[in-house]
Image (cartoon, grey):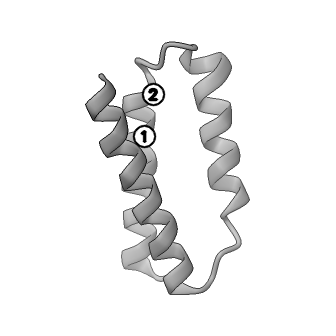
Amino acid sequence: MTNPLRSEVISLYKQLVYLGREYPAGYHNHFRPKLKAAFMKKKDLTNEDDIRKSIAFGEYIIKGNKILF
């Protein structure tokens, strides 16, 4: 992963962790393990386009979450 994309991924993870603190099903028991599993599943991506698609999907999730809360 190139450095600019790495910082984008880390920033996305931090934003999702921050939003997940208010998740109704619980942060420690539900949201955080699922978030970590989702990021670990994508950790081996090397194609820049695939990484950008994953980042765009994460940003879509953030926008949807902000609308709900």
From the viewer's perspective, tell me whether residue 25 is left or right of residue 2. right
The image shows residue 4 at horizontal and vertical percentages of 36, 77
Residue that appears at 56% across and 78% down: 50
Q: Amino acid at mark 1?
A: Leu
Badge 2 element: helix
Whether 67 is drawn above or below 37: the answer is above
Residue 3: quarter of image: bottom left
- In the picture, the disc for residue 30 is none
- Tell me if residue 9 can be seen: no
CB under 8 Å between callouts 2 and 1?
A: yes
Q: Amino acid at mark 2?
A: Gly
From the viewer's perspective, tell me whether residue 54 is left or right of residue 16. right
Tell which of 38 and 68 is nearer to you: 68
The image shows residue 48 at horizontal and vertical percentages of 51, 85
Q: Which residue is mark 1?
A: 16
The image shows residue 24 at horizontal and vertical percentages of 49, 13
Residue that appears at 36% across and 34% down: 65
